[in-house]
Amino acid sequence: MDMSTRPHKSGFTLLEILLALGIMGIIAVFAISLGSSVRQGAKVGETENLMKEIAVKSRSYYRNTRSLPAPGGTGGTEIPVAADALNMEQKYRYDSWGTPFSYYRHSTIGTTTADGNSCAGYLVSAGPDQVLAAAGGYGSDSNAVTAEDDLLIPIDVSQEAVEIALGDLKVLQSKVAAFDAIYAGIDNNSDGTVDESGCAAVDSSVGNCPPTSWGDTIDSDPNCGAATLDAVDNTTHYGCTATDPLGFIREIYALGTVYQSDPWGHDYIWGSPPTYDDSNQRYHKFFSAGPNGVADDADDIVP
């Protein structure tokens, strides 16, 4: 028989099989690694979304109460999900790896930061490794930074704080207008005209109209000339213990201590805001020095 005419049997050598298996193993390792990376990325996204929802709820709570809710748990860093706090489901206490979030709030807004952003508090997830990084410097009144694989989201209430300040100032100004209106249309010196400018008091022994400064004894009213609230003698004529316009308005209209200071902890100011005429007391009003606490600059809040 001619052997050349027999069919040739072909196949894989052992070396080829081992090489193929090696390539498949490498591909499998990369596939597993890629799959794990994709899953971790998905968990990071899920966790960040949870944190953003908590931050939104926290800002809403701040808008209504002027502060963030106290943290829960024995460690004092638990997300306050209770009905009398954020009123959220229990799932919001944990990140996507099942580790509890850490929640911190500041005693005064604007004094501390999270990743350089001024905030009222912040949320931290320990991230994929489920261990909080010591380098983050987390704490109730600390300047926190994102460290290692941790996730950090500030609770920024700057807009809510401005809204609160404007609301307070609106109330204070309405009381100034109410007090001013009590004396509108009064003839201070019996000359036949009302709300005179530059008039002299009926009884010269009790001072001048308008008076020269807060606390001067007067026998007229805040509508005399340009004086307004600056002219009020609170002790002699109203029996108030307050010795300043803000305290006077709060006392006679029984406004609570909440109207004493703005959300940044600075007392509201009576006087001439930026762009107003300092020489005319008729332009005086209550305003806030804003987040930096410095009056007469760009961040002042004026109703």
Image (spheres, rainbow, N blue to C red):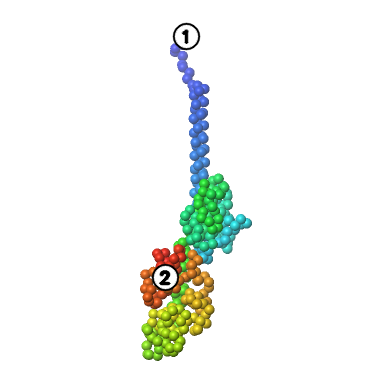
SS label for mark 2 = loop
Residue 74 quadrant: bottom right
Residue 175 horizontal/vertical position (percent): 46, 77
Compare residues 88 and 248 and report the one nearer the observer.
248
The answer to whether the residue labelled 2 contacts the one labelled 1, judged by CB atoms less than 8 Å apart, is no
- Label 2 crowding class (10 Å Cα cut-off): few <14, some 14-19, many 20+? some
Q: Residue furthest front?
A: 205
SS label for mark 1 = loop
Q: Could you tell me which residue is drawn at 47 percent across and 64 percent down? A: 161
Residue 107 quadrant: bottom right
Q: Could you tell me which residue is drawn at 61 percent across and 55 percent down? A: 75
Q: Is residue 181 left or right of residue 258?
A: left
- Label 1 crowding class (10 Å Cα cut-off): few <14, some 14-19, many 20+? few
Q: Could you tell me which residue is drawn at 58 percent across and 60 percent down? A: 82
Tell me the kind of residue under disc 1.
Answer: Met
Residue 70 horizontal/vertical position (percent): 57, 61
Residue 253 horizontal/vertical position (percent): 50, 77
Mark identifier at residue 1: 1
Q: Residue furthest top?
A: 1
- Residue that carries the numbered disc 2 in the rendered image: 303
Give me the C-alpha separation between circle 2 and circle 1. 112 Å
Compare residues 257 and 49 and report the one nearer the observer.
257
The reply to whether residue 269 is in sight is: yes
Tell me the kind of residue under disc 2.
Answer: Pro
